[in-house]
Amino acid sequence: MEIFNVMGKYDYEQLILCQDKASGLKAIIAIHDTTLGPALGGTRMWTYDSEEAAIEDALRLAKGMTYKNAAAGLDLGGGKTVIIGDPRKDKNPEMFRAFGRYIQGLGGRYITAEDVGTTTEDMDLIHLETEYVTGISPNTPGAAGNPSPVTAYGVYQGMKATAKEAFGSDSLEGKIIAVQGVGNVAYALCEYLHNEGAELIVTDINEDSVKRAVENFGAKAVGPNEIYRVDCDIFAPCALGAIINDETLPQFKAKVIAGSANNQLAEDRHGDALHEMGIIYAPDYVINAGGVINVADELAGYNKERALKKVGIIYSNLERVYEISKRDNVPTYVAADRMAEERINAKRQSRSQFLTNERHILNR
């Protein structure tokens, strides 16, 4: 990999390699863009096939966080960390404390959080060495605790905005909604949908999760492979990524796809196909931004009421996405990127104009 060529092509700001021999720490911090503010993005721990693969993952995820934070209306840039190792057997407290010291050394340019392979307890260890971490234990003053209910509220608001675009009303009463996966976020989402009068069809590989949704919300249960082809108004992917692909596209009967799962499009061309089919897709990083909005509120000392109010912006953010999609005649995933880029570019132009004015004043 020609690192500077990759960084230059996608305008990355910084790539930091962190090593601590005593604890076994091998971490990569990628900071993509800090135009809007300090880079916020989680720490992932994973077994990678190579160091190059780990670097590629860190860079890819950091860029995604730039767009997610910008689209969410946060004054934060995008970054990400990957720690090379097996989260089941390679962790130790010294590793995360050492990593916390590296974060502290960046002086606030990067703020981390929990991600795949890391836990609240890991964030607590990092917090012993730095203030630049979110997602710490809920018994800590100013901490957010479990983000699932807040993430679900954001998806619920985004689903209502998408229903309005598709059906002319944001009411979900009487709508048939197929929910793929009934984990913590999706279960909380189902509660919102049930309370509004939606009819639920659910699936999950965990039979107990399905049973709970059937008993509490009157949901209909179907098999994991059957969920794609059920007759429904809205399909809500809330489990695996890449579920919109060549195999599933011909099966969809829904008018709307809106759910909490990450990376729902297997490839960009599948987003193009949804656009051509007339299916309105709520871009995943816009509709599921409740989690990052929630942890970002910790930076001001967490207040749940304030966080929920901020998460409500997902409704208007998706309205804006659909406006851009129609304005530019592009798929919604492209429109979401453009919305984020417009916000970043506006800040850059504002900053450039400020510096120009300052130079004029100094040259008088």
Image: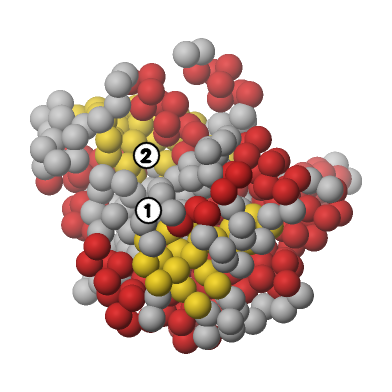
- Residue closer to the observer: 62 or 177: 177
| Quarter residue 20 falls in | top left
Depicted 153 relative to depicted 224: above or below: below
Depicted 165 relative to depicted 327: above or below: below
Q: Which residue is tagged 1?
A: 224
On the image, the x and y values in percent for residue 53 come to 38, 23
The colour scheme is secondary structure
Q: Residue at x 61, y 23 (%)?
A: 8
Does the residue at mark 1 contact the one at mark 2 (Cβ under 8 Å)? no
Q: CA distance from mark 1 to mark 2?
A: 32 Å
Q: Residue at x 80, y 60 (%)?
A: 323
Estimate how packed mark 1 is, as few (under 14), some (14 to 19) or many (20 or more) residues with alpha carbons within 10 Å. Answer: few
Q: Is residue 75 visible?
A: no
- Tell me the SS state at disc 2: strand
Q: Is residue 292 left or right of residue 88?
A: right
On the image, the x and y values in percent for residue 88 come to 14, 41
Q: Is residue 364 visible?
A: yes
Estimate how packed mark 2 is, as few (under 14), some (14 to 19) or many (20 or more) residues with alpha carbons within 10 Å. Answer: many
- Residue closer to the observer: 80 or 356: 80
Q: Is residue 254 left or right of residue 276?
A: left
Q: Residue at x 73, y 72 (%)?
A: 167
Depicted 3 relative to depicted 363: above or below: above
- Name the N-terminal-most of marks 1 and 2: 2
What is the three-letter code of the residue carrying label 1? Pro
What is the three-letter code of the residue carrying label 2? Thr
- Residue closer to the observer: 23 or 207: 207
Please identify the residue farthest to the right as the structure is shown.
364
Q: Residue at x 38, y 81 (%)?
A: 217
Q: Which residue is tagged 2?
A: 81
- Residue closer to the observer: 16 or 225: 225
- Tell me the SS state at disc 1: loop
